[in-house]
Amino acid sequence: MSDIFITETDLDPTASGALDGRTVAVKDNISTEGVATTCGSKMLEAYVPPYDATVVTRLKEAGATIVGKTNMDEFGMGTTTETSAFGPTDNPAAPGHVPGGSSGGSAAAVAAGEADLALGSDTGGSIRCPAAFCGVVGIKPTYGLVSRYGLVAYANSLEQIGPIANSVEDAAALLDVISGPDEHDATTRDAGDESDYASAATGEVDGLTVGVPRELVEGADDGVVETFEAALDDLRAQGAEVVDVELPSVEHAVEAYYVIAMSEASSNLARFDGVRYGVGAETDGNWNEAFAESREKGFGEEVKRRVLLGTYALSAGYQEKYYKKAQDARAWVKQDFDEAFESADVLASPTMPVPPFELGESLDDPLQMYLADANTVPVNLANLPAISVPAGESDGLPVGLQLIGKAFDEETIIRAGSALA
Ligand code: GLN
């Protein structure tokens, strides 16, 4: 069984700054110059990037010590960290259970005290799910707040790099360091004045309106709902007003997400053919055979499934039926969120509808795994920010509460999140 770290690094702090003396673990799909970046895949087992991702440069400039690269679902495809070619990671907060995924190694490193802070990436929940399952804090930033330069793409229209930490304030301080425009990523946006997310963690919720989309609560396990409702009571007791809101489109979010994510993945992963990247294959001039052999050897089962389904969804004749429809559903989800935010400052739901699975439990049932993403994927479809904070336990297993904010309004979810954790 793999431990938390895939490769250990020996980077020294280079400068004094906001993260001076802090240790940070980095998900293994974020490029680190001179240090292997495998994406949890056999395909990239021997890949050593020649440059740092922008977020890594910013960590170093802030004085952080990067202590290792963390285990993950292969190319980010999963909810348990069990699709890693290097084996699963145990959950320090619930031994024998999955740490969540795909940034499971990053959340486990923080929960186990092996790093003060960690970076994950979130395409459809991969920061928030492991944060919830390991009883720590995770933030998925608004699309465009954090540079994706140097992040190995899975589904680039959905994903963001973000912080995982033991407290909301620590996660916010890490967000301060990594956020902001980057000339290497044209999708980054200037969110306004110099960011100061750490000082937004005041825990002040008096007068705040928290909307609860019942669609994201109804499908959850009883124990999860009980813990969630108790956390809402806590917010009420601190002066927040809790109201019901509607997000009718989210019943289609999982289908739309998986069609879009797999379509983008089939295109993004085309570069792994054993020529420039990936495991090599012998060829006597038959390149099709060589590519097929490389991809057969290098990719695991879940990645192959998604590349095949994504290619199918994009192929002539099916594009209208699947990809185009999924894009329409995405627009509808965005519109529903806009309407919900007319009557609420933030929205709250259980982060995951279920407590952490036992190790091995969901591996043979991809559909069960996909459905567990029901509460996290709508946020990526709408490009919004969200935080997962520990809300308590259900039968001794960690439960996370998700707070969703308006675009580029990370401050409010940080403020509300810090009232609970
Ligand atoms: N579980 C989702 C998926 O498998 C999300 C993964 C992620 O956010 N990288 O696609």
Image (cartoon, grey):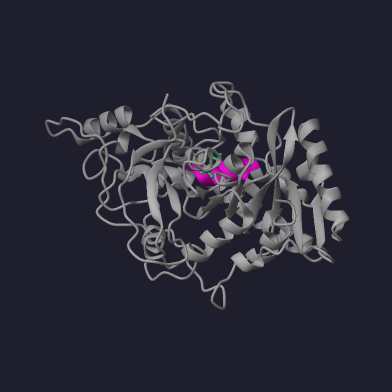
Total numbered badges shown on the rendered structure: 0
Q: Give residue 61's quadrant in the image.
A: bottom left
Question: Who is closer to the viewer here, 132 or 151?
Answer: 132
Q: Is residue 196 visible?
A: yes
Q: In the current view of this chain or complex, which residue is farthest to the front? A: 21
Residue 292 coordinates in the image, percent (x, y): 28, 31
Decide if residue 26 is on the left or right side of residue 371.
Answer: left
Question: Who is closer to the viewer here, 412 or 252?
Answer: 412
Question: Who is closer to the viewer here, 110 or 6?
Answer: 110
Q: In the current view of this chain or complex, which residue is farthest to the bottom? A: 193
Decide if residue 310 is on the left or right side of residue 129.
Answer: left
- Residue range (magenta): 254-262
The verdict on residue 136 being magenta is: no
Relative vertical location of residue 313 with respect to residue 198 in this rendering, above or below:
above
Relative vertical location of residue 229 with respect to residue 11 in this rendering, above or below:
above
For ligand 1, the image quadrant comes to top right
Decide if residue 88 is on the left or right side of residue 339.
Answer: left
Which residue is painted at 43% across and 57% down in the image? Answer: 21
Q: Is residue 219 visible?
A: no
Residue 354 coordinates in the image, percent (x, y): 70, 33
Q: Main secondary structure of the magenta part?
A: helix
Which residue is painted at 79% across and 32% down in the image? Answer: 223
Residue 179 coordinates in the image, percent (x, y): 50, 65
Q: Give residue 241's quadrant in the image.
A: bottom right
